[in-house]
Image (cartoon, grey):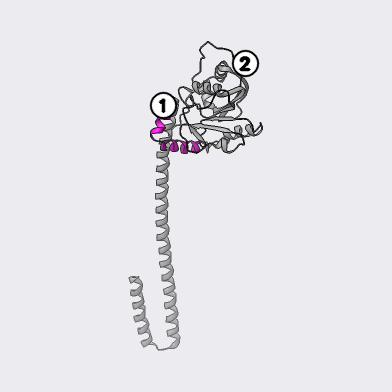
Amino acid sequence: MEGKRSKKRKRAKRLKFQKEKDNSPAVEEIDERKEEEEEEEEEEEESSDCAFAKRTKSQGLSKSSTFLEKMKAKLSGGHFRMLNEKLYTCTGKEALEYFKEDPQLFNVYHAGYQEQMSHWPEQPVNIIIEWLKDHSPSLVVADFGCGDARLAKNVKNKVFSFDLVANDPSVIACDMSKTPLDSSVIDVAVFCLSLMGTNLASFLKEAHRVLKPCGWLLIAEVKSRFDPNTGGADPKKFSKAVCELGFTSVFKDFSNKMFILLYFKKKDKQTLNRKEIEWPQLKPCLYKRR
């Protein structure tokens, strides 16, 4: 602004000198027009400088915001990986006690879980929802490891939703190996990406206990956990163990590249199995640092 005033004073002196030299109205008109043109050019330059300064500041803020968002995402991703590994390497009881001490950690885990699922082209829970819609709405369902109870919110069936923390009024917080259900009261037991824990066999035993004879057991799991070539379990051996528990294998779906679906039915008549069931070790689904 000071530079602009100085230039105006110089032009005024120059104009006064020119007037004294030549009092012609034409000269005066030309000088005034020149002055107006110079002022317009200066205003355009100042406006351009101001716009550039604002743009530079905005870009600086944008870069700063992007950096903070990246740092938050990195920290959040680190927490998720830690919690995910914890759930795969402890028992259901230990996991329940862990989240009881700090229920907020469960929210951190599920935020990371949802972010991972957002990259999947298809969600296994949606396939299970469609399966239930193709069957009678009178079937009573137990959702083991329900998360945000998405299954219960999308079907007409009566659904008992179980997980380690009750973030929704419809969810029952418990150790999935010891649900509060009576025996033989459920028509469909669902494990959707929830066979996590060193005692996952006890979760399936609990499902067998609460299912009615001929009740359904639906399992959706990450495909890599059932790939023997990469350290996963042999799906045939896993199915054999489930059948020895008291089920019949009905259908296996390996068509999706991200997950597999296993469909079993509880046997109508149970035989006493005195032999210890050999459960194959399911590979933990651990996410790499990005």
Query: Closer to the N terminus: mark 1 or mark 2?
Result: 1
Q: Which residue is mark 2?
A: 269
173 left or right, relative to 124? left
Three-letter amino acid code at the position of disc 2: Lys
Residue 127 x, y percent position in the rendering: 61, 33
Disc sitting over residue 228 in the figure: none
Q: Quadrant of residue 43?
A: bottom left
| Principal secondary structure, stretch drawn in magenta | helix
Q: Which residue is mark 1?
A: 94
Q: Quadrant of residue 56?
A: bottom left
> Which residue is pictured at 51% across the width and 25% down the height?
225
Q: Secondary structure at mark 2?
A: loop
60 left or right, relative to 135? left
Q: Magenta stretch?
A: 96-116
> Which residue is pictured at 55% across the width and 32% down the height?
160
> Which residue is pictured at 43% across the width and 29% down the height?
96
